[in-house]
Image (cartoon, rainbow, N blue to C red):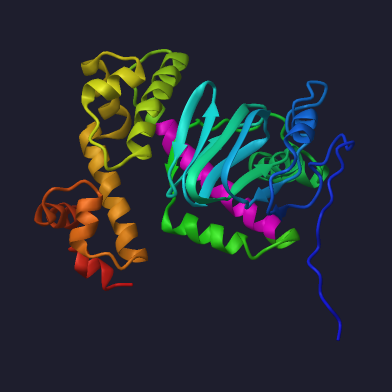
Amino acid sequence: MSRKFKKTVAVSVSETNVSQLPPFLRKTFPLLHELKARANDLNQKPGDCWPSLILNAQTKQIYRPDIRGPFSIFMNRKGISHCTLEGTRITLPEDTFLISNTGQYYSLEIDAPETVETFNLHLGNTFMEEVQASLRLSHSHLLDEPQARVEKLFIFPNRLNRKTSAFSAWIETARQREGEALEAHLMHLILYLLQEQKEIQAEISRLPALRKTTREELHKRLNQARDCLYSDTKQRHSLDHLAQIACLSKYHFLRLFRAAYGCTPYQYQLQLRIEKSAQLLRCTKLSVQDIAFSMGFDDPSSFSRLFYRQWGLYPSQYRNQF
C-alpha cells in the first residue's frame, strides 16, 4: 500500500528571497533569532525574506518582539493575543483580526492560562505584488508582461476588524488546503479585504477636515478608541475615556466619531454586543439569558428588544434558523 505524505517546505535562513515559495501552513513558531536575522536585515527589501505562510501554532506563553514583517493578518482560532504596532499594544479577542503592512515592526505576545491557537497570515512580497498587479494593471499590460508586479502595495489601517461568519468559514477552509489551492484561497481573502478598504476610505472622506493628511491622522486616532470598544465589548467605556485614548477633546471626539461611523460610540458598542450575541447564539448552547448577562446587559428583555431591532428576529427565533 502506498503512503501519502503532505508536501512540506523547508526554508533556509541563507535564502535572500523566499517570497516565491508556494504558500504553506506551519504549526510551530520559527526560531526567533533566525527569523529576526533574516526579517530585520535592512539590506533586504521588507517582505522579500518572507514566504507566504499561515502560522497555526498553539501556546500558552510566548513573546516575539520587534520583528519587521511582511503584509500580515493576526488572529486566533482560540484565545486572546496581543500585538504591538507603531507603539500601540492591541488586544485581539477571538472574534477579531488585525492587519499590519509590509515593513512594519510588530511584537506578538501571548500570556494565558489556557492554550491559545493562532492563525496568523504572513504574505510575502511576490504573492502580494502579483495579486495587486492582477487587480490594478490593465488586461493589455498583463498580456504584454504576464509577470508584471505592483511595487507600491495598498496600505491598510492598523485596527481591529470583526470576523464575519464568511471570514470564519474562510479560515476553516484554509486549514484544509495547501499549495495552489491555498494560494487561490488567499487571493479571495485579499479581494475581500480590498472591498473592506473601500469602506475605510469612505470613513476617512466623511471627516470634516480640508487636508487629506489631517483626515488620515484623525481617522487613526478614532481607530484607537474604536479598538478599545472591540477589545472588550462587555466593558462600558465612558466618552471621556474614549476621547482620552484618541487624544481629542470629548465633544470634538464625539462629533468626529459620528461623522466617520454614522453613530455615537455608545450605539457602536451596542451593535458590537448584539453581533457578538448573534455569534454566541449560532455557536453555543448558552441560554438567551446567559448570553445577555455575558454581554453586559442587565435586563434580558431589553437585550431581546435590541436584538430584534438589529436583526428583525428575537434571539430564540434567530437561533432556530441554525
Could you say which is closer to the camera, residue 96 or residue 89?
A: 89
Judged left or right of residue 191, residue 25 is right
The span picked out in magenta is: 182-202
* Point 26% across, 34% down: residue: 262
Judged left or right of residue 86, residue 322 is left
Could you say which is closer to the camera, residue 210 or residue 54?
A: 54
x and y, in percent, of residue 22 in the image:
78, 52
The correct choice, above or below, for 263 with respect to 118 in the image is above
* Point 49% across, 55% down: residue: 167
Using the rendered view, name the quadrant where residue 41 is placed. Answer: top right
Judged left or right of residue 18, residue 125 is left
Judged left or right of residue 232, residue 173 is right
Quadrant (top left/top right/bottom left/bottom right) for the C terminus: bottom left
Question: Is residue 311 something that shows in the picture?
Answer: no
* Point 27% across, 68% down: residue: 319
x and y, in percent, of residue 105 in the image:
63, 26
Furthest residue toward right: 14
Furthest residue toward front: 113
Furthest residue toward bottom: 1
Q: Is residue 211 magenta?
A: no
The correct choice, above or below, for 187 with respect to 156 in the image is below
The dominant secondary structure in magenta is: helix
Quadrant (top left/top right/bottom left/bottom right) for the N terminus: bottom right
Question: Is residue 303 something that shows in the picture?
Answer: yes
x and y, in percent, of residue 89 in the image:
48, 28
